[in-house]
Amino acid sequence: MKIVLWLTYLMSAVFILGETLRRGLSYFSVNATTMVEDYLCGALLFTAAILATKGSKLASKYMVAAWAYATGGMFVPFYAHLEAYLRGATFRADHIHTDVNSVILKGVIWSIALICFIVVLRNEAKPSLIQSND
């Protein structure tokens, strides 16, 4: 579970800082939905990580919710960009189909989210893995 906790902190930064560095705050005027989605995901992951670090009773529930949100939130960006690449057609101006590095990065992020989601979901049945201080 320590690796999942470490990844939770890391991925919260990836969602918040990565989105800000990649698009800049001015992108809110272009597509606020995608910015809010990534910031919310980062905030949920960070909250879950803090709760787990503190040993809260709510930690495992927040971990499941945060990783479920991250997995679902990355599904369409990854698979839509992968489909565009496979079809050789750009569907969105900011998802150019020839940008293979973005497809790979999105795939890695989605895979990490899915694996962490499965791990925390399985561990939800074993609450003793996260010690409670509440």
Image: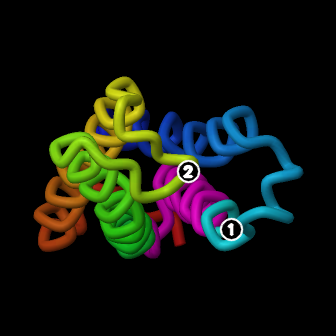
Count every numbered label the image shows and give the total: 2
Q: Which residues are magenta?
A: 37-59
* Residue at horizontal 31 percent and vertical 48 percent from the top: 89
The N terminus is located in which quarter?
A: top left
Where 92 sits versus 36, above or below?
A: above
Q: Residues within 10 Å of mark 1 (few under 14, many from 20)?
A: some
Q: Position of residue 105 (x, y in %)?
A: 37, 32
Report if residue 106 lies within the magenta region: no
Report if residue 46 lies within the magenta region: yes
* Residue at horizontal 43 percent and vertical 66 percent from the top: 66
Going by the picture, which residue comes out furthest to the front? 89
Where 27 sits versus 3, above or below?
A: below
In the visual, does 45 lie left or right of 68? right
Q: Nearer the viewer, residue 90 or 129?
A: 90
The residue tagged 1 is 36
- Give the CA distance from mark 1 to mark 2: 19 Å
Q: Residues within 10 Å of mark 2 (few under 14, many from 20)?
A: few
Label at residue 67 = none
Q: Position of residue 63 (x, y in %)?
A: 39, 63
Disc 1 marks a residue whose amino acid type is Val
Q: Upstream in the sequence, badge 1 or badge 2?
A: 1
The residue tagged 2 is 93
Disc 2 marks a residue whose amino acid type is Ala
For the stretch drawn in magenta, what is the main secondary structure? Answer: helix
